[in-house]
Amino acid sequence: MSFELRGLSWSTNKRMLSVLICVVCCIHSGKSQTCTDGFTYDRRARQCIDIDECRTLPDPCRGDMQCVNQNGGYLCIPRGLYSQSYARNSPRSYPEPSYPEESYPDRSLGYSEPFIHNVPPVGAGPGPGPGPSYPIVSRSTPCILGYTLGADGTCVDVDECETELHQCNPTQVCINTAGGYTCSCTEGYWLVGGQCQDIDECRYGYCQQLCANVPGSYSCSCSPGFLNADSRTCQDVDECETNPCAHGCLNTYGSFMCTCDEGFELASDGTTCNDLDECSFSDFLCQHTCVNTPGSFSCVCPPGYYVYEDGRSCEDLNECESGNNTCTTAQVCFNFQGGYTCLDPLRCVPPYIELSDNQCMCSAENPACRERPFTVLYRHMDLSSGRSVPADIFQMQATTRYPGAFYIFQIKSGNEGREFYMRQTSNISATLVLARPIKGPKTIVLDLEMVTVNNVINFRGSSIIRLTIFVSEHPF
């Protein structure tokens, strides 16, 4: 008996355990229905319904703020901004809804019996808060929330957006959905604290260079020197294609640079070129005169000179060699710095007789020659003004040497200004020294005398070099 009872008990226990698991699963399944914040699960309607915080929360808004219920939340806005179109009904109070104890069948097209009792329609009865944020189903409505009975007897979706039955605030956009609606923001806005606020697209680098935020959108632009190609990116503009520069143009990233040819400098406007006055840079650019030309300069020499190969210094023009002179065939052309002169043929003054082309002699046999120099030799030289002093400019030397003789060198005439003196360098030679600067143009004739003294035979004689010096004007 005991064994049978135990066997009966085990069989019975297995059936009871199966029922218990089924009940637990059903209970657990019902309790696992959860809703997002701001909604509560209605077991009778078997769906999440909005919680009207304006009614259920004690004093949800502080101060002079009006509570406005929203799907899944509520807003506190100043009462001055609370308009009738936004709060569609006057604040009223509603009694708490009561539900019958009987269970309701699961029907997709509605209910055969109304399931909400003692709930007044929107706008019914006075009260401190706004009406509920969802359509109220009356006893005559056979469809679930968000649907209405159509002409064909089926439940059709209620467009809360078109019928103004939504609770979206003025900054939001109502979007109808099957059995309800959602409150969203237009493009360029996002939802922050129940309000649609403009998105600052410029913070996210939508534009390559310059960005200007505008309500609901943004605008891209480029810096000067760039082209807005696709409303977002910028491409460099080659300004050189329009020839903005007077001379040369160099395109750079976002701009350009003008260049000037040699001898020019860029003006303050950055595009034109001004001639560079090279002559103003230095007084020593040219030996004589500097003449500025567009983009360059040239050196000019005075008459009697030409510009040397370096383009800056001046060289004497030898008119005698070039044939650019006016001397006759009987004359001798003598060139000096900056000019020339024509020398007439030598004429010896009696009692001198011509010994050669440039020398006259007074014979010792002629009594008139006893007190005169034995020979007169004619020499010519040129000298530039401003030559530094002292300077050795001419040298004399005895050509014939006699035993026991010595020589004395001196300036016999022509040195009235004492610009010269003789310096004896050896027993038979001496040098003419320029002691003071001479300013030309002028011609100086010096008689340089060499006196020969021989005490053995008691002889004393002299010879003269008649030196003609052409002092040219210093042109530099």
Image (cartoon, rainbow, N blue to C red):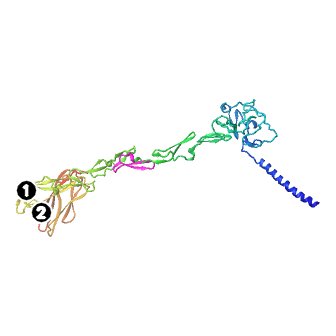
The amino acid at mark 2 is Gly
Answer above or below: position of 455 versus 277: below
Which numbered tag is attached to residue 461?
2
Q: Are marks 1 and 2 in contact (CB under 8 Å)?
A: no
Residue 286 belongs to the span the image colors magenta: no
Spatial CA span between label 1 and label 2: 19 Å
Residue 410 visible (yes or no): yes
On the picture, is 117 further left or further right than 157?
right
> Label 1 belongs to which residue?
349
Q: Which residues are magenta?
A: 241-264
Q: Residue at x 47, y 48 (%)?
A: 235
Mark 1 or 2 closer to N-term?
1
Answer above or below: position of 52 versus 15: above
Answer above or below: position of 135 versus 459: above
On the picture, is 434 further left or further right than 266?
left
Q: Position of residue 368 (x, y in %)?
A: 6, 59
The quadrant in which residue 41 appears is top right
Residue 262 belongs to the span the image colors magenta: yes
The quadrant in which residue 449 appears is bottom left
Nearer to the camera, 372 or 231: 231
Which residue in the rendered view is the most extreme toward the front? 152
Which numbered tag is attached to residue 194?
none
Q: Position of residue 175 (x, y in %)?
A: 64, 40
On the picture, is 193 further left or further right than 204?
right
